[in-house]
Amino acid sequence: MKGDQMTTFDTTHRADSSSARRAGPREWLALAVLMLPVLLTSIDNTVLSFALPQVSTALHPSGEQLLWLVDIYPLMLAGLLVPMGSLGDRFGRRRLLLIGAVGFGVASVCAAYSPNAEALFGSRVLLGVFGATLMPSTLSLIRNIFVNRDDRRVAIATWAAMFAGGAALGPVVGGWLLEHYWWGSVFFINVPIIVVFLAAAVFLLPESRDPRPGRVDIPSIGLSLAAMLPTVLGIKQFAEHGFSDVSVTSFAVGILSAAAFVRRQRRIANPMIDLALFSDRVFSGAIIANLLSLMGYAGFVFFAAQFLQLGMGLSPLAAATALLPGLVVTVLAGFAAVRLVRFIPARVLVAASFVMSALGYAIASFVGTPSTGSIMLAFTVLGLGIGLAETLTNDLMLSSVPPFKAGAASAISETAYEVGAVLGTAVLGSVLTSTYRSHLTMPSVIQWGDSDSSFETYGGTVELAREYPVMFGDHLLHSAQVAFDLGVQRTSAVAILIALAAAVVAWRTLKDA
């Protein structure tokens, strides 16, 4: 019966959506309001990357803690997006959006004034929890507000541009704030944006929900988290230490929990995820492409922020400014995709976007000596691919589901986005960190002791080098730069292989798009 309903929807929707009612001024104003939480959550994905040197100095986290400070936010988003999307379908997407915005503001203040790495970690957890209430509601509201296919494509292009652009804007905003204020200001900036959003959302956003909602399934929520958290922990442990008791156990728990989650979704009357969606080859291909594109993007931002500030000696604002061309290209590419897809098949554009990602990494690491200019060019090429991929994959995904299931489907898409961000930092970041630690050499006068963890990161090593005589400090700085450059090269090689493999997957799965 469920499959018959989906088939009926597909035939009627694809025939009528292009001739449905066009959006008016109120709908476009609602879209502008929805862009505020999109910017908030995407900026918070990357804003911490540019504050890592200052966080390393102020809070003294270990290398693994530094990775977790970056990872935990998108990880919590990834684990909770599907449950929150389901809650939005049941209780109202606008209501969930408003509740999440208030919680996000409170968590932002807590993060800004964190006295240590553990407190910042806890605040990032809360930001992830409340951020998960924001994202499914924004995309699902777009699905219900814009019933005309052409209008919806423009709206999705705007959403994707703000999402990808916000990820790039995070370092720019963070760079300016770090030039003038303390590191916690990169979180405090969220508060005034949330105040403006709450005031406008009450008047401009319509409420929508699933007309036939099922009950909230607490066991499914627990299983989704039990599948996500251990799996990412296993990836991180494997990247740093190879197979170990921790990594093997984590993978086992994650896989078993994922299997139990899938089995439960197949057996209960009102599943959190309609698994029938994945039987659509285009839907599944779009989700995979979404995940892999963000994996490369997040990994690039992780090392570029540190390279520009610590390797090239740029200030936070100057380093962030170097990424502006890539930000502009990312936004423009998203809107260009709306027109290009009329003449060029989606699978060609998405596959080409991964080739661009591979080229971007190659430019950054293997074309001459890395420099500010090469990083700018590489990020611009990468941004072109991301802008194309994000708009097209989200449009393909949303177009294949009925409006009343938009929350759950949007959550799946955004889960892929966040899992990609987590994997980008966990896998590529771990390759960078492990290579750096294994190739860092120190003068014999420098003894490993209580500050061992400070040598695990590029920023920590640079800070400690100032405490030693010039001769020893310069040797340590040179060794740190060489080790970091080697780490960037190895990270880029892995990213290039992933991007090229993803291009092949997109070409095969999006054949009928």
Image (cartoon, helix red, strand yellow):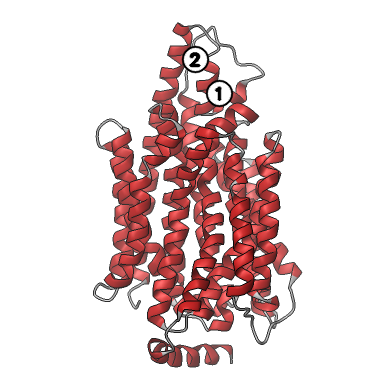
Front position in the image: 416 or 168: 168
Other residues around mark 1 within 10 Å, as few (<14) / some (14–19) / many (≥20): many
**Residue where numbered disc 2 is placed:** 442
In the picture, the quarter occupied by the N terminus is bottom right
Residue at 38% x, 90% y is 19
Residue 336 occupies which quadrant of the picture? bottom left
- Residue 365 is situated, as x and y percent measured from the top left of the image, at 32, 37
Q: Is residue 60 visible from the viewing direction of this image?
A: no
Residue at 45% x, 45% y is 299
**Amino acid on which disc 2 is placed:** Met
* Image position of 48 with respect to 381: above or below: above
* Image position of 480 with respect to 419: above or below: above
Left or right placement of residue 492 versus residue 92 in this view? left
Residue 247 occupies which quadrant of the picture? top right
Q: Which mark is residue 279?
A: none
**Residue where numbered disc 1 is placed:** 455
Q: Earlier in the sequence, mark 2 or mark 1?
A: 2
Residue at 39% x, 24% y is 482
Looking at the rendered structure, the secondary structure element under dot 2 is: loop
- Residue 284 is situated, as x and y percent measured from the top left of the image, at 46, 71
- Residue 70 is situated, as x and y percent measured from the top left of the image, at 57, 44
Q: Is residue 87 visible from the viewing direction of this image?
A: yes
In the picture, the quarter occupied by the C terminus is bottom left
Left or right placement of residue 396 versus residue 242 in this view? left
- Residue 109 is situated, as x and y percent measured from the top left of the image, at 68, 46
Q: Do the residues labelled 2 and 1 touch (CB within 8 Å)?
A: yes
**Amino acid on which disc 1 is placed:** Phe
Looking at the rendered structure, the secondary structure element under dot 1 is: helix
